[in-house]
Image (spheres, rainbow, N blue to C red):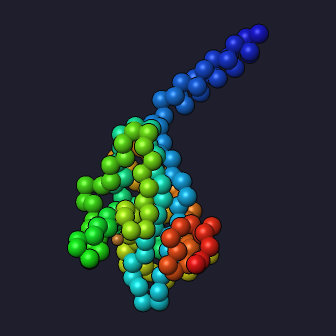
């Protein structure tokens, strides 16, 4: 009986501990795009959902010197890219998609080209939530999604 009480007590402690953990950001369908031989930057995409207001503040990967959060916008007929230096806002419960033509993570100073089919580790960092480690599949050059779509 005493042992049972002890076990229940431990379970309660574990439950409390789990509840006290900061809620994590959900990262779905991460993928990157293959790069040409002399290209030094590569785009990475993922859909992020945070249970509370948070901010994606950075990323890192062993395949790149560093990574930046970028936004692509059209200015007239010209596509421009700029770094979101303050990070990317993740409103509570809202899925924020990083996708071609818009928000993306830019892997800068690639140590070697990203090859289709390769899987690269990328860590995402947030203002509040603990970091998220991803295994990111590289899709072919020109891909618009993680690789399920057909070419036209
Ligand atoms: Cu970029």
Q: Residue furthest bottom?
A: 38
Q: Is residue 71 above or below residue 57?
A: below
Quadrant of the image occupied by residue 8: top right
- Residue 101 x, y percent position in the rendering: 39, 68
Q: Nearer the viewer, residue 59 or 99?
A: 99
| In the image: residue 56, left or right of residue 78 | right
What residue sits 54% from the left and 54% below the top? 28
Asked if residue 60 shows in the view, the reply is no
Q: Nearer the viewer, residue 52 or 143?
A: 143
Q: Nearer the viewer, residue 8 or 105?
A: 105
Quarter containing ligand 1?
bottom left
What residue sits 39% from the left and 78% below the top? 41
- Residue 31 x, y percent position in the rendering: 53, 66
- Residue 9 x, y percent position in the rendering: 63, 17
What residue sits 56% from the left and 66% below the top? 146
Q: Quadrant of the C terminus?
A: bottom right
Asked if residue 94 shows in the view, the reply is yes
């Amino acid at each position: 009986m005493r042992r049972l009480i002890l076990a229940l007590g431990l379970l309660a402690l574990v439950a409390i501990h789990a509840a006290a953990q900061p809620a994590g950001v959900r990262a779905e369908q991460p993928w990157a795009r293959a790069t040409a031989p002399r290209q030094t930057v590569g785009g990475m995409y993922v859909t992020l959902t945070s249970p509370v207001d948070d901010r994606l503040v950075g990323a890192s990967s062993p395949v790149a010197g560093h990574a930046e959060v970028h936004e692509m916008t059209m200015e007239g007929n010209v596509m421009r890219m700029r770094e979101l230096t303050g990070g990317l806002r993740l409103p509570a419960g809202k899925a924020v998609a990083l996708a071609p033509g818009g928000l993306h993570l830019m892997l800068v100073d690639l140590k070697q080209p990203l090859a289709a089919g390769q899987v690269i580790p990328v860590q995402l960092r947030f203002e509040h939530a603990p970091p998220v480690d991803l295994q990111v599949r590289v899709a072919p050059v020109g891909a618009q999604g993680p690789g399920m779509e057909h070419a036209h």
